[in-house]
Amino acid sequence: MAKVIVQNAKGIMGILFNGFNSIAASLGSTNYGFLLQFGVDAIIQHSDSGGFLNLNYLLKYLETMPTFLIFGGACWVINLILIGRLFEIIVYTVISPIPLATFAAEGWYDSAKAFVKSYAVVCLQGLVVIVGSNSY
């Protein structure tokens, strides 16, 4: 039993990962967020005249710059979290044969169950971040 589990550890972890990945892909293809409905004109209103030395355009640019910086920082933080989750999933998948081998042992059975639960939790955390960023 343990030999079969260890030999098929990649497939077992793949089933969990592909399940969460398919949910994320289906949600990502149907929901693009409400901000894509708006054009650039809805965010930045162009003034009718440029004013003296085109200062009206410069003032509008400076007015919207903090918003773009905040959004850029938020995107950077989200990408950093997603990369961290990706590395965590990779590490879990690489070391999966060791904890899954304990399914056959009676005394260590609970540690294998805990490993599978924690792997599912990491996949679910990545799914929540992806759904959250897509819905925005």
Image (cartoon, rainbow, N blue to C red):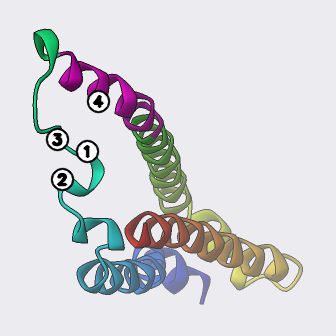
Mark 1 in CB contact with mark 3 (< 8 angstroms): yes
In terms of sequence position, does the residue under pointer 3 or pointer 4 come before the other? 3
State which region is magenta. Answer: 55-70
Amino acid type, callout 4: Lys
What secondary structure is marked by label 3? Answer: loop
Give the CA distance from mark 1 to mark 4. Answer: 7 Å
Give the CA distance from mark 2 to mark 3. Answer: 7 Å
Residue furthest to the right: 107
Amino acid type, callout 2: Asp
Answer with the quarter of the image where residue 136 lies: bottom left
Mark 1 in CB contact with mark 4 (< 8 angstroms): yes
Q: Identify whether 42 is placed above or below 29.
A: above
Mark 2 in CB contact with mark 3 (< 8 angstroms): yes
Give the CA distance from mark 4 to mark 2. Answer: 12 Å
The residue indicated by pointer 3 is 46
> How many C-alpha atoms fall within 10 Å of the one at disc 3: few (<14), some, or many (≥20)?
few
The residue indicated by pointer 2 is 41
**Image quadrant where one finds the N terminus:** bottom right
Q: Nearer the viewer, mark 2 or mark 3?
A: 3
On the image, the x and y values in percent for residue 127 come to 49, 72
Q: Nearer the viewer, mark 1 or mark 3?
A: 3
Amino acid type, callout 1: Ile
What secondary structure is marked by label 4? Answer: helix
Front position in the image: 17 or 101: 17
Q: Which mark is residue 44?
A: 1
In terms of sequence position, does the residue under pointer 1 or pointer 4 come before the other? 1
Magenta span: predominant SS is helix
The residue indicated by pointer 4 is 60
